[in-house]
Image (cartoon, rainbow, N blue to C red):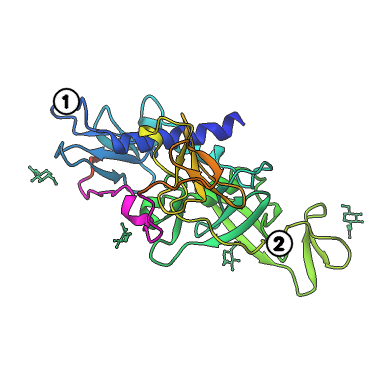
């Protein structure tokens, strides 16, 4: 539980940094500042009124002291942001009723909507092909900075067959090559399914495969999260659908749905039969419109490989 919470804390810090001014307090000659999104990321404050994000090339880490991109072992104090995010990302639906989006353990394009003990596997659209655990939404490959293979392979034994957590027809194996994880996919022969206990493909009639089928139900309206920094109540309305609302906590927002026949009443900030919808709710609302506009700079700090 604690581990899970920390993902949201990091997420929340990023949101508020993006909403606030990452360049506050920047001193002359130190135009690049750290970015809670990950160890390779930075903000460029060259134009203080227009902060832009960037990422060091390859796997170099941003080094705020030397204002450079350097090998991780040369950055003091060591940056552990990426590792925290990778280690703390849940790979399965929570067992409670919370509505959640969960990234696929090793496929960057796929994610799962967990909802009241059901789930639905989803795939990102072509124009935003990777799921981002920062936005909890699909984004470009660059901005999503997915690292799904690292996350998965960091949690299983290497060179061992592992079940595909979301299917029984295939299985995977992780190996390590020059400090990078590589994921290999395998397919059982027709009529066989991968058995977790034996770590081998067995006749599908010999055992029951326990990956649950996804249930078909409507996707809740986007956005799936909201910015809680200005919200003073425990719950707040969803901008596009009166049946939905967000819980706001100090660490982020959580989408929830009112009971059948109830609406989220904007004055009382709770679900009610005959609840009066927030006047700004617009059912043709497009989520894209309230997304944080990310600006990317090509201007990266100098590269220091010494
Ligand atoms: C800084 O960014 C603002 C907003 O994009 C822009 O209007 C301004 O011209 C920029 N200043 C410089 C010096 O580039
Ligand atoms: C990703 O999603 C697609 C479309 O739903 C599906 O066909 C594919 O098997 C998924 N990949 C994995 C590894 O689960
Ligand atoms: C596979 O494992 C199950 C227990 O998980 C065992 O009962 C079965 O005999 C094993 N089958 C083979 C072919 O090893
Ligand atoms: C609802 O949103 C759409 C698209 O954002 C806009 O065209 C429309 O005018 C809005 N309607 C109202 C009543 O605000």
Q: In the rendered view, tell whether residue 34 sits above or below residue 272.
A: above
Residue at figure coordinates x 19%, y 30% from the top left: 30
Neighbor class of circle 1 (other Cα within 10 Å; few <14, some 14-19, many 20+) is few
- Say whether residue 288 is magenta: yes
Q: Is residue 256 left or right of residue 22?
A: right
- Say whether residue 243 is magenta: no
Helix, strand or loop under label 2: loop
Residue at figure coordinates x 44%, y 43% from the top left: 237
Q: Which mark is residue 213?
A: 2
In the rendering, at what x and y percent does residue 61 appear? 36, 38
User: Which is more toward the observer, 211 or 200?
Assistant: 211
What is the tally of numbered marks visible in this picture? 2
Q: Which mark is residue 27?
A: 1
Q: In the rendered view, tell whether residue 194 sits above or below residue 261.
A: below
In the rendering, at what x and y percent does residue 92 appear? 64, 47
Q: Is residue 177 visible in this depiction of the protein?
A: no
Q: In the rendered view, tell whether residue 18 sits above or below residue 140.
A: above
Image quadrant where residue 192 sits = bottom right
Residue at figure coordinates x 44%, y 34% from the top left: 10
In the rendering, at what x and y percent does residue 97 appear? 65, 44
Secondary structure mainly formed by the magenta segment: loop
Helix, strand or loop under label 1: loop
Rendering quadrant holding ligand 1: top left
- The mark that comes first in sequence, 1 or 2, is 1
The quadrant of the image that shows the C terminus is top left
Q: Are marks 1 and 2 in contact (CB under 8 Å)?
A: no
Q: Choose mark 1 or mark 2, whichever is in front.
A: 2
In the rendering, at what x and y percent does residue 86 appear? 52, 41
What are the residue bounds of the magenta stretch?
280-299
User: Which is more toward the observer, 174 or 103?
Assistant: 103
């Amino acid at each position: 539980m604690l581990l899970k919470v920390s993902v949201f804390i990091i997420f929340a810090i990023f949101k508020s940094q993006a909403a606030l001014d990452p360049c506050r307090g920047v001193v002359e000659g130190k135009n690049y500042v750290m970015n809670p999104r990950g160890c390779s990321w930075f903000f460029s404050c060259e134009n203080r009124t227009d902060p832009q994000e960037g990422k060091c090339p390859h796997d170099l880490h941003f080094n705020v002291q030397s204002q450079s991109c350097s090998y991780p072992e040369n950055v003091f104090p060591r940056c552990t942001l990426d590792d925290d995010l990778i280690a703390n990302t849940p790979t399965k639906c929570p067992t409670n009723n919370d509505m959640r989006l969960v990234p696929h353990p090793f496929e960057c394009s796929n994610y799962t909507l967990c909802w009241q003990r059901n789930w639905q596997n989803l795939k990102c659209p072509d124009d935003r092909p990777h799921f981002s655990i920062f936005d909890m939404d699909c984004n470009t490959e660059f901005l999503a900075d997915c690292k799904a293979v690292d996350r998965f392979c960091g949690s299983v034994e290497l060179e061992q067959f592992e079940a595909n957590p979301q299917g029984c027809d295939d299985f995977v194996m992780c190996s390590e090559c020059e400090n990078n994880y590589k994921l290999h996919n395998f397919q059982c022969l027709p009529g066989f399914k991968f058995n977790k206990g034996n770590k081998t493909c067995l006749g599908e009639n010999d055992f029951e495969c326990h990956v649950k089928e996804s249930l078909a139900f409507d996707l809740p309206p986007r956005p799936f999260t909201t910015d809680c920094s200005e919200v003073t109540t425990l719950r707040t309305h969803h901008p596009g659908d009166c049946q939905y609302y967000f819980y706001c906590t100090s660490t982020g927002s959580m989408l929830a749905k009112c009971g059948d026949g109830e609406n989220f009443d904007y004055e009382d900030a709770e679900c009610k039969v005959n609840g009066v919808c927030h006047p700004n709710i617009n059912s043709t609302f497009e989520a894209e419109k309230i997304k944080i506009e990310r600006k990317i700079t090509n201007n990266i700090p100098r590269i220091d490989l010494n």
